[in-house]
Image: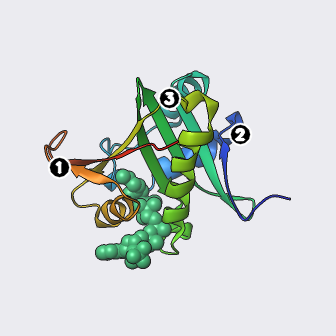
Amino acid sequence: MQGKYLLRRATPEDEEVLLLWKNDPTTRENSGDSRVVTSEEHHNWFTRRLQSENVLLYIFCVGGVPAGQGRLDLLGYTAEISYGLAPEFRGKGLGRKLLTQLMEKAISDPQASEITVLYGQVKYSNVISKKLFKSLGFKEVMEPSKSGEMVLYKKVVR
Ligand SMILES: CC(C)(COP(=O)(O)OP(=O)(O)OC[C@H]1O[C@@H](n2cnc3c(N)ncnc32)[C@H](O)[C@@H]1OP(=O)(O)O)[C@@H](O)C(=O)NCCC(=O)NCCS
């Protein structure tokens, strides 16, 4: 039986909901790229990500309902974490569950077997995400990667 919280790999059927979440104003505000994305741009982006061996794209489901997304972009021994919830699922403590399950995927997903460091790039203004990363053991890299963002990292213990 399916658990209440499930992080599953994305499929082509998830294209539309991911575009909806990508263009949500709060997601855009907290993203490095805050433009509104067209469905054509999104289609190209999504198709490439689904096919890439270096991208693990997941859908976070709550009671079987798609509630958010998580992504691990693999580069050498590192994986960059991106994540977000649909607006109606925010403010309920689900971000922690999503991030925790994403960290577990970095250990359990065979495609991530080389990964020894996880990191996230978070805007200084994104108080909630900073707090979540830190509460799950991520440490702040002192030099910002680019203006307005901090990098938080954590070693993967297998
Ligand atoms: C980031 C995100 C996933 C957080 O998930 P969430 O479930 O909505 O987070 P919560 O509301 O449960 O809050 C998480 C923590 O931040 C705290 N928090 C919430 N709003 C806060 C605020 N304005 N100031 C300080 N702390 C705040 C909560 O109290 C909670 O702390 P706790 O775990 O000690 O109780 C969600 O807000 C989201 O999807 N945002 C848009 C996309 C995004 O920013 N992605 C991350 C990019 S790095």
Residue 141 in picture, x, y percent from top left: 20, 46
Residue in the foreground of this view, choosing between 91 and 19: 91
Write the residue at 29% across / 61% down.
Answer: 126
- Asked if the residue at label 3 sits under 8 Å from ligand 1, the reply is no
Write the residue at 34% across / 48% down.
Answer: 31
Residue 6 in picture, x, y percent from top left: 68, 55
Residue 121 in picture, x, y percent from top left: 30, 45
Residue in the foreground of this view, choosing between 47 and 51: 51
Query: Which residue in the structure is indicated by mark 1?
Result: 148
Give the number of the mark in front: 3 or 1: 1
Query: Which residue in the structure is indicated by mark 3?
Result: 45
Provide the secondary structure element on which disc 3 rests. Answer: helix
Residue 67 in the image: above or below residue 106? below
Query: Which residue in the structure is indicated by mark 2?
Result: 13
Q: Distance of mark 3 from mark 2, alpha carbons?
A: 14 Å
Disc on the earlier residue, 3 or 1: 3
Q: Distance of mark 3 from mark 1, alpha carbons?
A: 25 Å
- Asked if the residue at label 2 sits under 8 Å from ligand 1, the reply is no
Residue 62 in the image: above or below residue 12? below
Q: Amino acid at mark 1?
A: Gly
Provide the secondary structure element on which disc 1 rests. Answer: loop
Quadrant in the picture for residue 53: top right
